[in-house]
Image (spheres, rainbow, N blue to C red):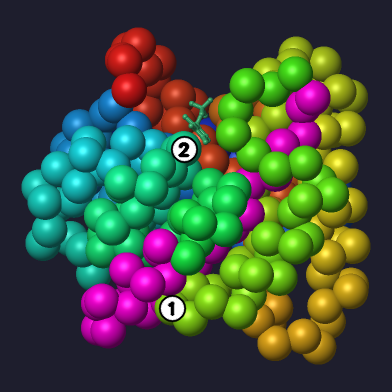
């Protein structure tokens, strides 16, 4: 068995154990395989082991691999999870199924208009990226700014608001990891409870949180999509974005 295939089996076991420990159904947690920096053949290998959802951070790199895997397109789901600049939104709107990293209205508006140029495609599935660690250099919103961006995105055509995404600062302390994820879950619940019958919120069901080193804490705190890279594909070589 290849390393990727055995890693996938291990990750699924980790998801299952963490879910059961949290009294959750393992099926309620989707595995997103983060394939950035790894070649198309690694994705193909994971796909043959049953993995269909893949996450990418760099538009150019992703589009190149999508081209190489074009024949498999009907079975693959592509998630954009990296920082998104205005000049890249068009390609993201054209090629991806999900975007996890929307953190300002301008980006969402561009994605909405540009997705509309491809009427054959379904709505782009959107998560709003929130910022949970105060000293975090990564992009993202404060919890208090999140709701108004959700409200705006919920009204845009060609987009479906799905939930929230977060990347807390790395921590080795499981309790600290859980605290960050709990903040995001609390924010998610507040927004959800307030918008139960509001149009544009019908599919607000997603908490994208947890990576290779903190997925158990994320699942304990309600994650519905874990984004796992190195624990599936191996250690990444450093690349300059
Ligand atoms: C790279 C990346 C991941 C995967 O990280 P691992 O630690 O390799 O599992 C998840 N989410 C985002 C946003 C990433 O950039």
* Residue at image mark 1: 158
Q: Which of 89 and 22 is in front in this view?
A: 89
Is residue 215 visible in the rendered image? The answer is no
Is residue 112 visible in the rendered image? The answer is yes
Give SS at disc 2.
loop
Write the residue at 72% across / 37% down: 131
Give SS at disc 1.
loop
Ligand 1 within 8 Å of the CB at mark 1: no
Horizontally, residue 160 falls left or right of residue 172, namely: left
Q: Using the image, determine if residue 157 lies above or below residue 14.
A: below
Q: Which part of the image, by quadrant, shows the C terminus? A: top left
Q: Which of 229 and 159 is in front in this view?
A: 159
Residue 43 picture location, percent across and down: 26, 42
Write the residue at 45% across / 24% down: 230
Q: Are marks 2 and 1 in contact (CB under 8 Å)?
A: no
Q: Residues within 10 Å of mark 1 (few under 14, many from 20)?
A: many
Residue 62 picture location, percent across and down: 25, 43
| Residues shaded magenta | 110-134
Residue situated furthest front in the rendering = 106
The alpha-carbon separation of the residues under discs 2 and 1 comes to 21 Å
Ligand 1 within 8 Å of the CB at mark 2: no
Write the residue at 31% across / 15% down: 239
Task: Check residue 132 for magenta coloring.
Answer: yes
Task: Check residue 160 for magenta coloring.
Answer: no
Write the residue at 27% across / 29% down: 38
Q: Using the image, determine if residue 18 lies above or below residue 111.
A: above
Horizontally, residue 227 falls left or right of residue 143, namely: left
Number of marks: 2
Residue 76 picture location, percent across and down: 30, 60
Q: Which part of the image, by quadrant, shows the N terminus? A: top left
* Residue at image mark 2: 83
Question: If you read the primary sequence from the N terminus, does the residue marked by circle 2 or circle 1 appear first?
Answer: 2
């Amino acid at each position: 068995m290849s390393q990727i295939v055995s890693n996938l089996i291990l990750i699924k076991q980790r998801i299952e154990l963490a879910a059961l420990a949290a009294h959750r159904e393992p099926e309620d947690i989707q595995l997103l395989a983060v394939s950035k920096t790894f070649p198309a053949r690694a994705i193909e290998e994971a796909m043959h082991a049953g993995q269909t959802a893949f996450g990418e951070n760099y538009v150019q790199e992703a589009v190149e691999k999508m081209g190489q895997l074009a024949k498999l397109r009907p079975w693959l789901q592509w998630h954009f999870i990296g920082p998104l600049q205005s000049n890249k939104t068009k390609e993201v709107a054209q090629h991806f199924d999900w975007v996890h990293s929307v953190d300002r209205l301008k980006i969402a508006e561009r994605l909405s208009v540009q997705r509309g140029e491809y009427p054959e495609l379904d709505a782009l599935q959107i998560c709003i990226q929130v910022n949970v660690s105060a000293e975090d250099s990564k992009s993202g919103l404060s919890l208090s700014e999140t709701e108004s961006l959700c409200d705006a995105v919920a009204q845009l055509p060609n987009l479906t608001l799905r939930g929230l995404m977060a990347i807390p600062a790395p921590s080795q302390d499981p309790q600290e990891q859980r605290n960050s994820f709990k903040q995001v879950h609390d924010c998610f619940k507040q927004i959800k409870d307030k918008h139960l019958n509001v149009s544009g919120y019908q599919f607000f069901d997603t908490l994208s949180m947890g990576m290779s080193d903190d997925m158990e804490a994320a699942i304990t705190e309600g994650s519905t999509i874990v984004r796992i890279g190195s624990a599936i594909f191996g250690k990444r070589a450093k690349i300059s974005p």
